[in-house]
């Protein structure tokens, strides 16, 4: 398989705290990888480094064999690496359709009108898939928490060159219908070649989606493997339960 994203001896310190500790980690094109670990294990920090929110203290991140360490988030997103947030981040005073379109046209150019109708059609298709078309023209701030999470998730697919999508607790606080919509979309888009990293505490969802799972504890990768291998691993049991 083709490696699309890789971290090399990645370290991030906050003063005396080592939040990410020499992490070597890689994703293959089109895979759906799970990332699990106890609270405070460094999962979100790892996503923040990959997507440019934090710079690494040492080590680097490569995407399609290019070092992207230290690039700002907008440049990393433009290359095709996007992420969601555990608490959805939408523009509350803008409508749902405007929130969908902004990811396509964030890199503003005077020629955007040429592609506007095509982008609206794509956004409407995604909103229909997510059963959100009835909220198309509503302000994002009026949506429920689950609806906001779903709009944030579907919005990523408006980016034409999306290659890797990092999902930070996508199923937290959403109902079963929203969760099923997200999971079906992940499976469908992975089959089209998009790579996913799914951070979640919901082990049943991880088991269903992810043939391979990476486990972080105290900022370091302690093991990788199938979910059956993970749950039988003594280091994992110790990390979650204390040893």
Image: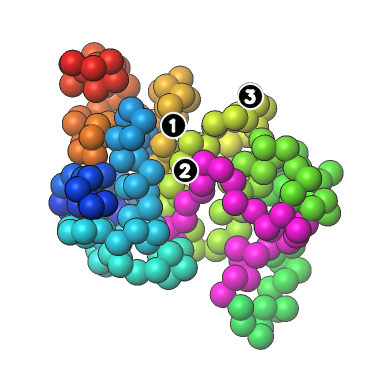
User: Are the residues tagged 2 and 1 within 8 Å (C-beta)?
Assistant: yes
Q: Which residue is mark 3?
A: 176
Say few, some or many: other residues with alpha carbon within 10 Å of mark 2 (under 14 / 14 to 19 / 20 or more).
many
| Whether residue 121 is visible | no
* Nearest to N terminus: mark 2 or mark 1: 2
**Residue 190, magenta (yes or no):** no
Q: Which residue is mark 2?
A: 167
Q: Which numbered disc covers residue 216?
A: none
Q: Residue at x 16, y 47 (%)?
A: 22
Corner quadrant of residue 34: top left
**Residue 105, magenta (yes or no):** yes
Say few, some or many: other residues with alpha carbon within 10 Å of mark 1 (under 14 / 14 to 19 / 20 or more).
many
Secondary-structure class at tag 3 = helix
Corner quadrant of residue 57: bottom left
Q: Which residue is mark 1?
A: 200
Say few, some or many: other residues with alpha carbon within 10 Å of mark 3 (under 14 / 14 to 19 / 20 or more).
few
Q: Residue at x 43, y 47 (%)?
A: 166
* Nearest to N terminus: mark 3 or mark 2: 2
Secondary-structure class at tag 1 = loop
**Dot in front, 3 or 1:** 1
Q: Residue at x 32, y 47 (%)?
A: 46
User: Are the residues tagged 3 and 2 within 8 Å (C-beta)?
Assistant: no
Query: The magenta stretch spans which residues?
Result: 80-107
């Amino acid at each position: 398989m083709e490696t699309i994203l890789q971290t090399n001896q990645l370290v991030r310190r906050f003063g005396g705290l080592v939040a990410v500790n020499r992490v070597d980690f890689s994703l293959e094109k089109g895979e759906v990888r799970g990332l699990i670990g106890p609270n405070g294990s460094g999962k979100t920090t790892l996503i923040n480094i990959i997507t440019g929110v934090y710079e690494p203290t040492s080590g680097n991140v490569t995407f399609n064999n290019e070092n992207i360490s230290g690039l700002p988030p907008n440049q990393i997103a433009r290359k095709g690496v996007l992420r969601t947030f555990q608490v959805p981040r939408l523009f509350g005073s803008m409508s749902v359709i405007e929130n969908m379109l902004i990811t396509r046209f964030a890199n503003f150019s005077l020629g955007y009108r040429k592609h506007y109708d095509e982008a609206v059609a794509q956004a409407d298709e995604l909103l229909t898939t997510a059963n959100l078309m009835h909220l198309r023209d509503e302000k994002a701030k009026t949506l429920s928490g689950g609806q906001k999470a779903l709009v944030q998730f579907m919005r990523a697919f408006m980016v034409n060159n999306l290659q890797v999508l990092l999902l930070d607790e996508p199923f937290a606080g959403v109902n079963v219908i929203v969760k099923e919509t997200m999971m079906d979309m992940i499976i469908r888009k992975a089959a089209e070649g998009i790579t996913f990293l799914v951070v979640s505490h919901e082990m049943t969802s991880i088991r269903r989606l992810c043939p391979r799972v990476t486990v972080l504890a105290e900022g370091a990768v302690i093991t990788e493997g199938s979910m059956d291998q993970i749950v039988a691993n003594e280091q994992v049991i110790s990390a979650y339960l204390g040893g």
